[in-house]
Image (cartoon, helix red, strand yellow):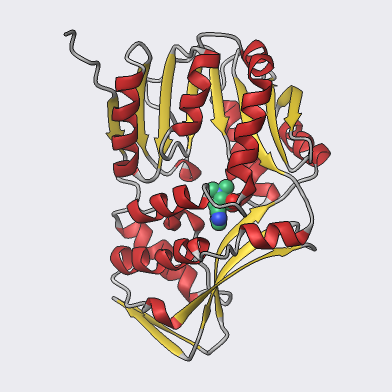
């Protein structure tokens, strides 16, 4: 038996430091209290998100997968073989793995903030695809996108599926896309999944499901913050809220105090009255033309848009124009 290749993995210790504690404390002290959605993804949070993707109400994952299944050959033709597939927010790497037989990438680079989760996923994947060179990077790419030297420069394809771009405001999204563009050489491109505007009942249900999995996912952020900041949040004192804010074209998740609450952490404290909220996530929804416009403003062009029959979700391929 030949020995299996081992994927290269490295961690830029994204969460365990003083800057993170300072970021969390600043968010909790802000007039409108907030916790960044990136803190939803500790090891349990990543598993809860996987469970969300199985829910009947949560259409994005399955709709995007159906688009890939239906338009696979066209996607493969647009991208061509031997790309350097850079997976932003790889999670369990399942979406990228579904592209391997279509794209035949030369290298697979999986990036995720939840590095323990990623390490396991990429080791399993390397067993299934021993001929693809794999690298796992545990880093917070929202803080910067400088890629280490092991990442090939040729034919970089930034893969940003699942409408994760929706966590950014449109201005932040444009800036983030510009940073991706700056990491593309002359032959770089982008394959991005963007959730489209739809009726609010569908959106409300997708972010407040009957089983309460999304509620558990949202509440779990408090346990993660307790560990990172040394805070003393008590989960039963909080309630999940998830709903479409049509005026802002975004789904919002909040945690609402069920009663008056006092939260303390080393060097700080905050009182919440019953009904006060902590904003934990935005998930922006775009119209197709606005999504393409955003990519163009960031230096990408020749967009091809694939969508589902209901036009609920868009998968877009766009090439990086020379800077
Ligand atoms: C991973 C950011 C794309 O916004 O739909 C799912 C996260 N939050 N349910 C989304 C999420 C609540 C998800 N993204």
- x, y percent for residue 130: 32, 14
Q: Where on the picture, by quarter, is residue 72?
A: top right
Vertical comparison of 1 with 28: above or below: above
Residue at image location 58% in from the left, 44% down from the top: 164
Q: Is residue 55 left or right of residue 171?
A: left
Residue at image location 29% in from the left, 21% down from the top: 127
Q: Where on the picture, by quarter, is residue 78?
A: top right
- x, y percent for residue 186: 61, 13
- x, y percent for residue 217: 46, 61
Vertical comparison of 143 with 64: above or below: below
Residue at image location 46% in from the left, 73% down from the top: 28
User: In terms of depth relative to the viewer, which is nearer, 51 or 16?
Assistant: 51
Residue 193 makes an appearance in the image = yes
Q: Is residue 298 left or right of residue 261?
A: right
Residue at image location 35% in from the left, 11% down from the top: 131
- x, y percent for residue 118: 35, 38
User: In terms of depth relative to the viewer, which is nearer, 45 or 84?
Assistant: 45
Position of the N terminus, as image quadrant, is top left
Position of the C terminus, as image quadrant, is top right
């Amino acid at each position: 038996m030949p020995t299996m290749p081992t994927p290269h993995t490295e961690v830029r210790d994204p969460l365990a430091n003083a800057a993170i504690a300072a970021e969390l404390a600043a968010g909790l002290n802000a007039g409108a209290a907030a916790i960044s959605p990136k803190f939803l993804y500790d090891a349990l949070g990543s598993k809860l998100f996987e469970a969300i993707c199985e829910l009947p109400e949560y259409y994005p994952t399955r709709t995007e997968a159906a688009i890939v299944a239906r338009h696979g050959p066209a996607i493969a033709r647009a991208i061509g073989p031997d790309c350097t597939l850079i997976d932003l927010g790889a999670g369990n790497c399942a979406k990228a793995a579904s592209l391997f037989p279509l794209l035949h990438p030369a290298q697979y680079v999986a990036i995720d903030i939840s590095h323990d989760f990623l390490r396991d996923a990429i080791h399993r994947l390397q067993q299934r695809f021993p001929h693809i060179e794999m690298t796992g990077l545990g880093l917070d790419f929202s803080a910067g996108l400088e890629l280490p030297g092991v990442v090939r420069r040729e034919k970089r394809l930034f893969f940003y599926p699942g409408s994760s771009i929706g966590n950014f405001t449109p201005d932040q999204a444009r800036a983030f896309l510009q940073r991706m563009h700056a990491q593309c050489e002359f032959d770089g491109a982008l394959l991005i999944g963007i959730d489209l505007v739809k009726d609010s009942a569908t959106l409300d249900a997708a972010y407040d499901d009957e089983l309460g999995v999304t509620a558990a996912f949202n509440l779990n952020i408090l346990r993660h913050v307790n560990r990172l900041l040394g805070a003393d949040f008590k989960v039963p004192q909080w309630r999940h809220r998830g709903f479409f804010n049509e005026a802002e074209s975004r789904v919002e998740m909040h945690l609402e105090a069920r009663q008056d609450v006092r939260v303390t952490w080393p060097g700080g404290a905050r009182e919440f009255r019953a009904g006060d909220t902590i904003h934990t996530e935005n998930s922006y929804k775009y119209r197709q033309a606005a999504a393409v416009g955003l990519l163009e403003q960031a230096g990408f062009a020749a967009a091809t848009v694939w969508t589902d029959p209901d036009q609920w979700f868009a998968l877009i391929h766009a090439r990086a124009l020379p800077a």
